[in-house]
Image (spheres, rainbow, N blue to C red):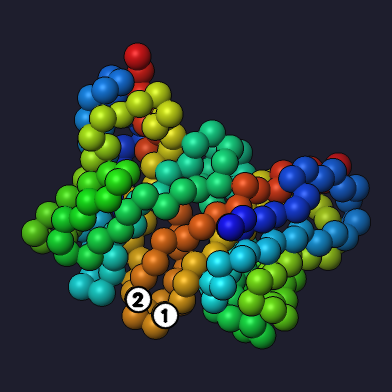
């Protein structure tokens, strides 16, 4: 699976959009981009995933660049409860669904 | 719908003891996996299974055994506990279809301390 690079930490004001970047310059055509988050000591929570097109669900939007070498997770109106570690993961669509976690980005939402 | 249930939530073991961490899901997911998370680090894959009777090793399998006799259950066995196995253990499941991708559902974790 392609490696990802994320900033170690970011701050965001409550009510503003949080934009979390991820670089995956070695991504191949059969690899998806996934985002998960982990709040405090809880189990990770699935947020969104995509292959080529931008995706949106009730939690967030995922913007993937045209060359697919980077992506941005957008939380449109961050709340204090969105403070968490956010993991960007690239995974091959055929490889047995194994999920490999990196260090992630600590997002701190401040009032 | 309970999702993924892990028991126990907390456990203290003495070095050399054995135990089984339980994981059960009620979503009829084919794929199940075990991760461990050490303080300040990301999750590392221990073992996984793509269906009943099929298991395989992840990144850090040494010292752990798994079996998958039913779709619902995927227990993780520590054969002889060591202090290095002190960690938080997460079980996860997802649907499995060749060439398709789905989000994982994680359990709330088992916090294990080996003294």
Residue B100 picture location, percent across and down: 35, 76
Residue at the (8%, 59%) spot, across then down: A66
**Circle 1 residues within 10 Å: few <14, some 14–19, many ≥20:** some
Direction from residue B17 to residue B109 in the image, left or right: left
Q: Residue at x 76, y 59 (%)?
A: B21
Q: Quadrant of residue B35?
A: bottom right
Whether residue B107 is visible, yes or no, is: yes
**Horizontal side, residue A97 vs residue A67: left or right:** right
At x 54% / y 76%, what residue is drawn? Answer: B30
What chain does mark 1 sit on?
A: B
On residue B97, which mark appears? Answer: 1
Task: Please identify the residue farthest to the front as the structure is shown.
Answer: B1
* Frontmost residue, A58 versus A75: A58
Residue ranking furthest to the top: A111
Q: Residue beneath label 2, please?
A: B100
The local secondary structure at tag 2 comes to loop
Residue B51, given in percent of the width and then of the height, sits at 58, 81
Labels 1 and 2 touching (C-beta < 8 A): yes
Q: On the image, which quarter does residue A106 sit in?
A: top left
Distance from the alpha carbon under mark 1 to that under mark 2: 5 Å
Q: Quadrant of the C terminus of chain B?
A: top right
Residue A58 percent coordinates (x, y): 30, 46
Q: Is residue A73 visible?
A: no
**At numbered mark 1, what does the secondary structure look like: helix, strand or loop?**
loop
């Amino acid at each position: 699976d392609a490696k990802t690079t994320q900033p170690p930490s970011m701050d965001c004001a409550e009510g503003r959009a949080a934009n979390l970047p991820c670089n995956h310059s070695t991504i191949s055509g059969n690899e998806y981009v996934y985002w998960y988050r982990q709040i405090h000591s809880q189990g990770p929570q699935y947020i969104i995933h995509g292959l080529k097109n931008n995706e949106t669900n009730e939690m967030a939007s995922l913007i993937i660049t045209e060359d697919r070498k980077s992506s941005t997770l957008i939380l449109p109106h961050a709340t204090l409860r969105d403070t968490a570690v956010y993991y960007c993961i690239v995974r091959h669509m055929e490889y047995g669904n194994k999920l490999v976690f990196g260090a992630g980005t600590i997002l701190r939402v401040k009032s | 719908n309970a999702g993924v249930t892990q028991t126990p939530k907390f456990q203290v073991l003495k070095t050399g003891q054995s135990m089984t961490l339980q994981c059960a899901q009620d979503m009829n997911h084919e794929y199940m996996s075990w991760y461990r998370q050490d303080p300040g680090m990301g999750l590392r894959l221990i073992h996984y299974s793509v269906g009943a009777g099929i298991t395989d090793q992840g990144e850090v399998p040494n010292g752990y055994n798994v079996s998958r006799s039913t779709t619902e259950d995927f227990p993780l066995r520590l054969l002889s506990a060591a202090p290095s196995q002190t960690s938080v253990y997460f079980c996860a499941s997802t649907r499995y279809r060749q060439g398709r991708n789905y989000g994982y559902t994680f359990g709330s974790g088992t916090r294990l301390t080996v003294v």
